[in-house]
Image (tube, rainbow, N blue to C red):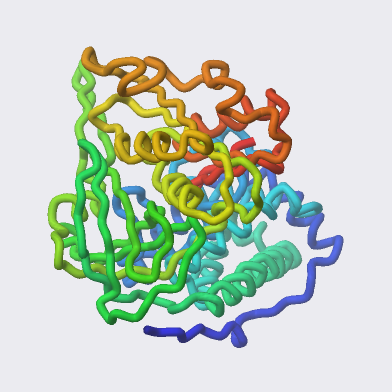
Amino acid sequence: MSKTIESSGNLPHPPPLVPEQRKLIAATVPILAEHGIAITTLFYEQLLDVNPELRNDFSHSKQEVCPLYLSKTCANAYLPPSLQRGHQAEALARAVYAYAANIEDLTPILPVVERITHKHTSLHVAPSHYAVVGKHLFEAITQVVGADMFKGNLYEAWGAAYWNLAHVFINREHELYEAAQWVGWREFVVAKKIQESDEVTSFHLEPKDGVPLELYRPGQYISVQNFVPELGLRQSRQYSLSDVPNPESFHISVKREPGIRTVAHSGALDTAKAAHPGWMSELLHARLAEGDSIEVAFPFGEFFLDDSAAPVILLLAGVGLTPLLAMLNTLVKADIKREVSWVHAVRNERVHAFREHVRKMREAHPDRVCTRVFYSEPSASDGEGRDCDVRGRLELEKVPREVLRLDAKDAQYYVRGPETFMSDTVSGLKSRGVDASRIHAEVFGSGATPK
């Protein structure tokens, strides 16, 4: 196992920004709003053209550069409509804009820093990556905005700003690497492969070297890497760990993704089809068999179960169940007997993973575990009261007050699922008097934290 951590000693270390520099950066906000997409599109093209080795870290399903998570996971606050569409190719523009727009007070983007650094360390981002990103980002800005404008004091102000922010990430990432059991990829073997529903399959991964695993926090994730023959590249993806931490193995439960859909226009008729599968999920489901090997990174993630004795309410939609399942399993087995609610939105019985597992937990611990299941697209055979509690979309007003545990003023709420679901759920909890400090929502991608 490797524990080598790259030094940042040879990188620029400018002093903190002075007021004049902050004013210059704030003044560029309108320019970024107008040209942000053009800048970042050119940035990605030139980055990969000059650094083809990064294509091994480039997600061809999502069109994002994995080791450059700094550029695509910043807060979405205060962005103009032109930068709010959420496509991965636009995420760097959102990040640069957010930084410039909040240069006088970075408080709105600070909550995102911890999330970004965990994503970075999961993908082994090194200090040298920041030099690569900075070089190509500044070249793209210069080409789009013009060398006659992006020069002198303005260029120097942005250089100082970039490296001041970069070192915030580099320093925190160094701390995370120091605390990890290993850095880089470690070979694991698929000990078990279990189909949980029509869409979800679980993989039990054991370290090939037999060295016991350090325990992670329920809710965290691992990165896995494998070679994709169709691309001729290695690809990495992050998957939440879905069971109680143990020293023998990691468990992940993966949804089979259909891939990006493209629309072909033919007169008045539009037809949609999958351009290609979600490369890694397709590989895991269709090709990775028991006994096969796969490379795994040490667990990271800032979204995890707290250590208090307060009641826990888990609100989830679809495959967002995976980190919350690890929390549920841990809570049931823990010495501290915390009350827990499982509120799950899923389409129907065919895609309802771990249905029997959760039911058995509720029946074994009726004094502590309660559940509420919603089927948004139930089949004719899905019975209300048998397979689900409510036929319809998850709406908080349809969840009994005692299940939401609204009278417990210290209850902790964990929310996981599609961004719209999380945003609606977080807003609904706040409207019912739940303080924001007790609501924990994980954004697994480049979107903003739900408000």
- Which residue is farthest right? 19
Label tally: 0
Residue 221: quadrant of the picture: bottom left
Q: For this rendering, which residue is in front, 289 or 68?
A: 289
User: Could you tell whether 255 is left or right of 22 in the image?
Assistant: left
Expressed as whole percent of the image width and height from the top left, the position of residue 395 reads 51, 19
- Residue 164: image x %, image y %? 70, 69
Residue 76 at least partly seen: no
Indicate the quadrant containing the C terminus: top left, top right, bottom left or bottom right.
top right
Residue 222: percent from left, percent from top: 40, 62
Q: Where is residue 121? Give x, y as percent.
A: 49, 68
Seen in the picture, residue 353 relative to 243 is either above or below; the reply is above
Residue drawn at x 41%, y 53% is 240
Q: Residue at x 29, y 79 (%)?
A: 210
Identify the residue shown where x is 53% and y is 38%. 368
The front one of 132 and 181 is 181
Judging depth in this view, the residue of 419 and 345 nearest the camera is: 345
At x 63%, y 58%, the residue is 113
> Looking at the figure, which quarter contains the N terminus?
bottom left
Relative to 324, does residue 85 appear above or below in the rendering?
Answer: above
Residue 28 appears in the figure = yes
From the viewer's perspective, tell me whether residue 127 is left or right of residue 356.
right
